[in-house]
Amino acid sequence: MTSSPGARRARFDHVSLGFDTPGGRLTVIDDVSYDIDEGEFVAVIGPSGCGKTTMLNMLAGFQAPTSGRVLFDGVPVSGPGPERGVIFQEYGVFPWLTVRDNIAFGLRLKANRVPAAERDEICSHYLALMGLSEFADAYPKHLSGGMRQRLAIARAYAVRPRFLLMDEPFGALDAQTRIHMQNLLLHVLAAERKSVMLITHSVEEAVFLASRVVVVTARPARVKDIVEVPFGYPRTEQLRERREFAELRAHVGRLVMDEYKATTPAQSFVPAD
Amino acid sequence: MRVRGLRTFVLRLAPWLCVLLLWYAVRLSGFVNDVLVPSPQQVGARFIDLLLHHGLLYDIFASARRVFAGVALGIAAAVPIGFLIGWYRPARSFADPLINFFRALPPIALIPLVIVYFGVDELAKLVILFYAAFFSGVIVMYEGVSQITPLYIRVAQTLGASELETFLKVIIPLTVPHILTALRVALGVTWATLVASELIAAQRGLGATIQNASTYFLLDVIYVGIICIGCVALIMDTLLRRLSAWLLVWQDRAAA
């Protein structure tokens, strides 16, 4: 690794995105700037449809801004690449490959090819880490939603990305599985530190996982506030019960809720009596 | 396990028994002139007669070979063309009306033209069957390919796949189910077109057998021909389904 901890990994530099529609110019993202440093865990939170995922797509290399720059390691992003692993909300596990072959997929590509013995070793390591060893030879159709997402994380980790981009990764899971997955993610990150950009609409998730929370406004997306999360790592389940955690969660929750109010008719928030 | 196997067997057999009963019922009901509906045993006897003395096996072989060649060539063309149309939107707007125009034409209507351009030999029959297989297969292919979700392609790209690797390792596996469906559909349509293709001065083949029998009003021979076509088509379809089940074990399906 060339850079020291604290070095800048990703940077959104006055990024805007707009479309020309028959009704006029539609601005989706409006002059957004923030950085994600080495080893940092940044959660981006905001009302649904505000353009959070679009920001992730820009850093992943799927979409280009209409103005401003998206930089990775100081270089403008021009397309997807294995140093930026992406975890999608819809998992995207390959149904035609077994669990083990899903993890091995990236390791068989020219970009990150390793000898077969090493590949098997890496696969076994992540199978064990993600609790999937028993299912190594099963097809994804036999896996639950949580297991599919664990597989997607294992597959992304296997090619050793320096940066993880997670697009509402636990959004489709039930509440218990979601909590379990959050703890598992912290556990995996403690073992192998990465810089992370997490898109979420859960305030609890953002504050529990991230070291910094970027609160985004309703469309067009602007940076409303950047909240430092002062709790160190490793974090455990006990953190959720601490008063400071509850206060910070309430603070971020208010910031996000203001944005929901801005997009919804006010009377729906007035009590019925 | 044994009881279940027996149950499946009975379940598979039952519809055929029903058809047989219905056949007898029609004859016994008296609504239809007996001469117009040969009895099952009469058809059975004719089947054995044709098999032993008139080379029915060769007719079956001749027809199966034509169908096989028509489907093989038709699908070999339909897969790449259907793929291109499904994958590239401009290609689709270009080819869609053409394909739907030609697909709507029944192959039988083309027979006079085929005779003019291709004569009355084996080639002419192949052209008709190719036509039937191609147009039924190409639609299945492009509908299927155009529904491939970009998600898997994105995943492969973020793992570092080049365009060629994405094609070989993601797009091809996702296309296989559609190729198999296209094969199945084409096989059905091509068998259905067989009789028409053998209208073109065919000496041998199940369609020819039926044609010749109709000239002499040999209803039992017509019945034998029809049943043979159905049986051979059913066998081919079953084999293809077995192949699909084996190739697509990964698919989330209620039953194979």
Image: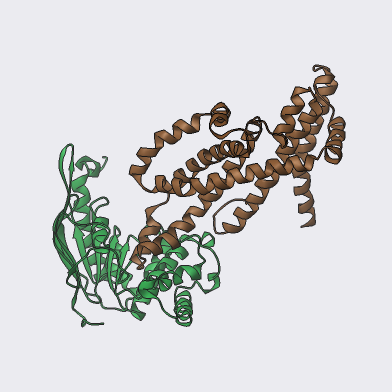
Chain colours: A green, B brown
Q: Nearer the viewer, residue A44 or A139?
A: A139
Would you identify the image quadrant in which residue A137 lies?
bottom right
- Residue B105 vertical position relative to residue B168 in the rendered view, above or below: above
- Residue A157 vertical position relative to residue B256 in the rendered view, above or below: below
Q: Nearer the viewer, residue B184 or A156?
A: B184
Q: Nearer the viewer, residue B246 or A51?
A: B246
- Residue B96 visible here: yes
- Residue B84 vertical position relative to residue A78 in the rendered view, above or below: above
**Residue at figure coordinates x 79%, y 30% from the top left:** B221
Image location (x, y in percent) of residue A105: 44, 69
- Residue A216 vertical position relative to residue A244 in the rendered view, above or below: above
- Residue A92 visible here: no
**Residue at figure coordinates x 23%, y 45% from the top left:** A269
- Left or right of residue B1, residue B244 in this image: left
**Residue at figure coordinates x 68%, y 33% from the top left:** B202
Would you identify the image quadrant in which residue B167 lies?
bottom left
- Left or right of residue A67, residue A157 in this image: right
Q: Nearer the viewer, residue B251 or B23?
A: B23
Image location (x, y in percent) of residue A236: 35, 75
- Left or right of residue B134, residue A271 in this image: left
The mark total stands at: 0
Image location (x, y in percent) of residue A266: 20, 42
Which quarter of the rendering shows the C terminus of chain A? top left
